[in-house]
Image (cartoon, grey):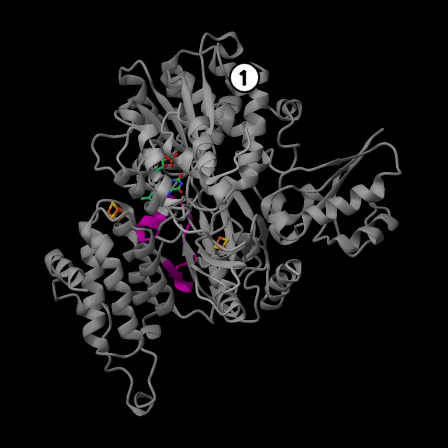
């Protein structure tokens, strides 16, 4: 019998030495027959990467984090038999607490299968969903998505079934399925992990979408920063064409579906769906005014489904297991599971897929293991660079769309970035503005000019130049950006800034040398200073004068 | 066909991609990949092939961070400036790299060897802080490990 050894080919695993580990193992095993080295995706237990697994009669056992220099001793101590005496032994993979406590649906194959091996994919439930979809009518397919309760996992959480219904109902010879694989949010990596570990899952989901709405062409708009995902997707697409799972008359269904990957070019705003469509058309990634919705006038003016990688990958699971099974997870209007991504200063960073409703505290402590440094955690940013910073008093929040919105928080694409007490929240607020200034598409003034003014204003606050007046100005600037921006880039950049001001006010009042002796408490707070209105015009003037 | 001149590389990129829907980005990616930048004297060729104005093509080139109008160094170091990396000491890495190379972001060392660029998330946030050197991604880096990586780039050239 062949012994299977697994070493992930995931980008993150490679970034910490997985290729060297694989090369060393391969060299060592050349002389032994009956051993197969498989480059799987990651299970998402990143603090253990590179995590090597070996198949045994009891199941797969794991070792990690492994470096190339550990390979000799691992082999000597019986790696190939799954022996568990080595200090890097982790026991049965499925029994690792971090993984065992999860509810993996979208990521059920991640790290388990050989990513571009179609037989392996099928052996794990792959293409059962598509086989079912081709026996259903278009409307039945859309109804299935509606019944699942799936909401877009890209950030805006719009009900996927309703979006598909609009595209189905819009007449058109040509319709498109576009996968948003731009994954620009810092602190998130689930799309990447999924595309690298289970590319057929996405391809199958897009094919089901095409059948449901009557589209015959699909694009995956992939960020250029993900070359491994690019390679994996292209390989899988080629195999799917060869197996008649893409192309003309897919599985004899009468439906044609052609699929292609297109690369982004380092622009955060191109993750916004209308900017993405402009970019796919070969233009500057400037946000379009809505309406018209992309579902009605999307790519090249045609009805277009734009969905995130995780939304589309989840479609395969919903069609395989049934809408009801999927909707039995979650709470309230947030049904199913959410892949949370733990990042920043946590002991155990990785992917946690769970039903909605887990608390942030559970994610940070039970899964994340708390602070990775010797300092306690202080601030957590949820939902990417446009998400609010949450102080400890809010960490008991249940992670669902509505609950977070209730505290002006953002769930977004599921990123959770933890900071310890060394963080300077005025510096973080400055960065939010700087990022917006850097990545704004430039279409509207409050965002384009406001963000630059925001950086300057925070700089003055930090330098204690006219601090009180500048704090007042900053708050008004935030309000102007929130109310006067065309899209969430300008509209939500104030979220992290305002949350820093509200919950970490002290960081904007670092005492200067002269001040250390004066009494505290007389300083103004941000809340008390919202009275001065700054019009868009005055920002515009300020902008053009510089 | 092998491109011997800039002109040939540009024409090849146009030829291979102009039949695509939304062909401009694929063309620019190909030229950027082959030549390391988009030579301004050839913008006209791209514009003519796609029935666009020169200003339109220029507008697209300048919109995206990936497309460069000037050649970069032989090696490119990208340091992640985004939040997860910040939380793990990314700012110190950034400062150390700048100090070591004696350049700021978007600059190239005097010998034309190394260009330094900021990047906003490499999707390696579970192994922050992260940097990328040419096509290789590195995670859990320290000031020392990045310094060593730079030294090995420098050693390569001798
Ligand atoms: C500034 C900005 C950036 C965005 N970036 C992304 C992104 O990188 N990936 C993504 O899937 N959605 C992103 N979105 C959300 C998309 O506009 C859109 O809602 C999403 O692609 C729809 O797919 P879904 O319904 O499956 O989530 C972004 C939105 C904004 C305003
Ligand atoms: S808010 Fe900013 S990014 Fe969005 S459309 Fe306006 S300028 Fe563009
Ligand atoms: S924030 Fe640096 S890799 Fe994501």
Residue at (28% x, 47% y) in the render: A441
Corner quadrant of residue A121:
top right
Q: Nearer the viewer, residue A458 or A440?
A: A440
Position of residue A326 measured from the top left corner of the image (x, y, whole percent): 48, 30
Q: Nearer the viewer, residue A451 or A5?
A: A451
Pointer 1 chain: A
Position of residue A342 measured from the top left corner of the image (x, y, whole percent): 51, 52
Question: Is there any visible trace of residue A384 in the rendered image?
Answer: yes
Question: Which residues are the magenta region?
Answer: A389-409
In which quadrant of this rendering is ligand 1 seen?
Answer: top left
| Labels in figure, total | 1
> What quarter of the picture does the C terminus of chain A occupy?
bottom left
| A398 inside magenta stretch | yes
- Categorize mark 1 by other alpha carbons within 10 Å: few (<14), some (14-19), many (20+): many
Residue at the spot of label 1? A245
Secondary structure under tag 1 reads loop
Q: Nearer the viewer, residue A366 or B76?
A: B76
């Amino acid at each position: 019998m062949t012994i299977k050894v697994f070493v992930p080919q995931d980008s993150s695993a490679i970034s910490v030495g997985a290729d060297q580990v694989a090369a060393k193992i391969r060299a060592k095993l050349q002389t032994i027959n009956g051993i197969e080295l498989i480059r799987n995706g990651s299970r998402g237990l990143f603090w253990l990467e590179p995590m090597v697994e070996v198949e045994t009669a009891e199941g797969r056992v794991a070792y990690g984090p492994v470096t190339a220099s550990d390979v000799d001793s691992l082999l000597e101590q019986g790696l190939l038999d799954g022996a568990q005496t080595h200090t890097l032994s982790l026991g049965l993979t499925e029994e690792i607490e971090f993984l065992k406590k999860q509810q993996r649906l979208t990521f059920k194959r991640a790290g388990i299968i050989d990513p571009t091996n179609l037989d392996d994919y099928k052996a794990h439930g792959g293409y059962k969903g598509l086989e079912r979809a081709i026996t259903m009518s278009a409307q039945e397919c859309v109804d299935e998505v509606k019944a699942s309760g799936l909401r877009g996992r890209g950030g805006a959480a719009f009900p996927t079934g309703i979006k598909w219904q609009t595209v189905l109902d819009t007449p058109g010879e040509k319709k498109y399925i576009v996968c948003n694989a731009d994954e620009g949010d810092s602190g998130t990596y689930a799309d990447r992990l999924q595309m690298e570990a289970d590319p057929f899952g996405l391809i199958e989901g897009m094919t089901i979408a095409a059948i449901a709405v009557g589209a015959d062409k699909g694009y995956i708009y992939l960020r250029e920063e993900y070359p491994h995902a690019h390679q994996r997707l292209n390989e899988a697409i080629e195999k799917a064409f060869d197996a008649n799972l893409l192309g003309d008359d897919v599985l004899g269904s009468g439906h044609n579906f052609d699929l292609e990957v297109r690369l982004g070019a380092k622009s955060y705003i191109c993750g916004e769906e209308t900017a993405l469509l402009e970019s796919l058309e070969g233009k500057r990634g400037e946000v379009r005014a809505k309406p018209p919705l992309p579902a009605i006038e999307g790519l090249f003016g045609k009805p277009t489904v734009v969905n995130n990688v995780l939304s589309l990958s989840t479609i395969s699971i919903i069609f395989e297991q049934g809408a009801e099974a999927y909707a039995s997870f979650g709470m309230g209007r947030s049904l199913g599971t959410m892949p949370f991504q733990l990042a920043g200063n946590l002991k155990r960073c990785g992917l946690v897929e769970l039903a909605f409703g887990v608390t942030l505290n559970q994610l940070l402590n039970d899964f994340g293991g708390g602070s990775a440094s010797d300092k306690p955690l202080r601030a957590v940013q949820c939902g990417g660079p446009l998400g609010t910073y949450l102080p400890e008093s809010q960490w008991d929040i249940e992670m669902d769309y509505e609950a977070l919105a209730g505290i002006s928080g953002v769930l977004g694409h599921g990123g959770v970035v933890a900071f310890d007490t060394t963080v300077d929240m005025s510096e973080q607020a400055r960065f939010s503005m700087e990022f917006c200034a850097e990545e704004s598409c430039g279409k509207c003034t409050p965002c384009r000019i406001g963000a630059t003014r925001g950086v300057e204003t925070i700089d003055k606050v930090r330098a204690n130049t006219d601090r009180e007046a500048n704090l007042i100005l900053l708050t008004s600037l935030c309000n102007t950006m929130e109310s006067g921006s065309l899209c969430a880039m300008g509209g939500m950049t104030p979220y992290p800034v305002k949350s820093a001001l509200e919950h970490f006010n002290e960081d904007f009042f670092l005492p200067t040398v002269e001040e250390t002796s004066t009494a505290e408490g007389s300083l103004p707070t941000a809340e008390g200073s919202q009275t001065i209105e700054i019009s868009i015009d005055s920002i515009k003037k300020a902008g053009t004068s510089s | 066909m092998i491109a011997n001149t800039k002109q040939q590389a540009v024409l090849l990129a146009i030829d291979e991609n102009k039949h695509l829907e939304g062909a401009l980005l694929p063309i620019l990616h190909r030229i950027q990949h082959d030549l390391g930048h988009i030579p301004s004297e050839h913008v006209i060729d791209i514009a003519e092939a796609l029935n666009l104005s020169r200003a339109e093509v220029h507008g697209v080139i300048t919109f995206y961070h990936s497309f460069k109008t000037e050649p970069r160094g032989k090696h490119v170091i990208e340091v992640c400036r985004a939040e997860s990396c910040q939380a793990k000491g990314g700012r110190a890495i950034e400062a150390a790299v700048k100090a070591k190379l004696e350049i700021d972001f978007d600059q190239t060392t005097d010998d034309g060897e190394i260009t330094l660029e900021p990047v906003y998330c490499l999707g390696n946030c579970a192994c922050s802080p992260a940097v990328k050197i040419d096509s290789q991604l590195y995670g859990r880096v320290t000031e020392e490990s990045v310094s060593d990586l730079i030294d090995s780039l420098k050693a390569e050239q001798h």
